[in-house]
Image: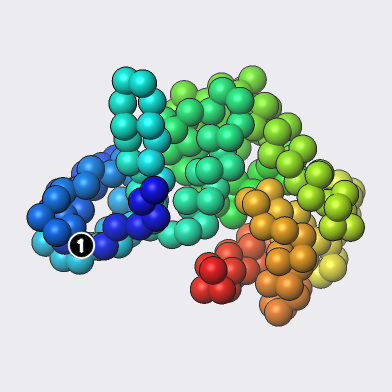
Amino acid sequence: MLYSLRGKLIYAQPKLAVIECGGVGFRCQITMTTARQLPSVGAEAMLYTIMSVREDAIELFGFAGQAELECFKQLTAVTGVGPKAGLAILSELSPEKVALAAASGDYKAFTRAQGVGPKLAQRIVLELKDKFGALAASGGVELPGGGGGIPSAAGNAAEAVSALSVLGFTPSEAAAAVGKLDSALPVETLVREALKSLAKKG
């Protein structure tokens, strides 16, 4: 319903921001990552938003970037992961780190978030990896092997495409974005730069 908000930031704290648009203050729950990117109170701010409507509450969640918003949608689609857990995870991990952890099966990375135990972390990895598996099957992209050798440039690119697919991009979109970059770059850098170009395209 509400795609984004742009207006004066009238209140801010680590987990909350209020943006005034047309005389109405919109209360947005935010991640620590978004909080660090907010301007000072009184300045213009812009957040990408998603609304959650339940029987007992209507909540608005705001994110500084589209990648964080898309990652939040992917996380909260996982069984047992509510908005609170989604915000907690994205306060600890950037979208690219979420994607890399899911693609590589590193469930322990998710347990750094408050309220996320080992069982839920394993479920996150399982369900996000399953989503990627379906995309890979249709798009012909394979997860890189888990060997212990030195990662090759091609392996870095493949792992970056895997991570982007976990975030919800199609294999062709992910491959096109990564293909424009130097495949010798670290995987996390490839994912971060590809996310920037995909955000501009969107």
Vertical placement of residue 182 versus 131, above or below: below
Placement of the C terminus among the 4 image quadrants: bottom right
Name the residue furthest front.
Answer: 1
Give the side of residue 199 with respect to residue 57, left or right: right
- Residue in the image at 73% along x and 41% along y: 131
Q: Residue flagged by tag 1: what amino acid is it? A: Gly
Q: What element carries label 1?
A: strand
- Residue in the image at 68% along x and 72% along y: 177
On the image, the x and y values in percent for residue 124 come to 64, 32
> How is the model colour-coded?
rainbow
On the image, the x and y values in percent for residue 93 come to 51, 46
State the count of labels: 1
On the image, the x and y values in percent for residue 2 come to 36, 51
Identify the image quadrant of residue 174.
bottom right
Question: Is residue 51 or residue 197 the one in the foreground?
Answer: 51
- Residue in the image at 20% along x and 66% along y: 44
Give the side of residue 56 with respect to residue 115, left or right: left
Crowding at label 1, few (<14), some or many (≥20) Cα neighbours within 10 Å?
many
On the image, the x and y values in percent for residue 66 come to 47, 59
Does residue 161 appear anywhere in the picture? Answer: no
Q: Mark 1 points at which residue?
A: 7
Vertical placement of residue 95 versus 157, above or below: above
Give the side of residue 83 with respect to residue 76, left or right: left
Identify the image quadrant of residue 105.
top right
Give the side of residue 177 with respect to residue 67, left or right: right
Does residue 157 appear anywhere in the picture? Answer: yes
- Residue in the image at 80% along x and 61% along y: 158
Identify the image quadrant of residue 186.
bottom right
Question: Is residue 182 or residue 147 the one in the foreground?
Answer: 182
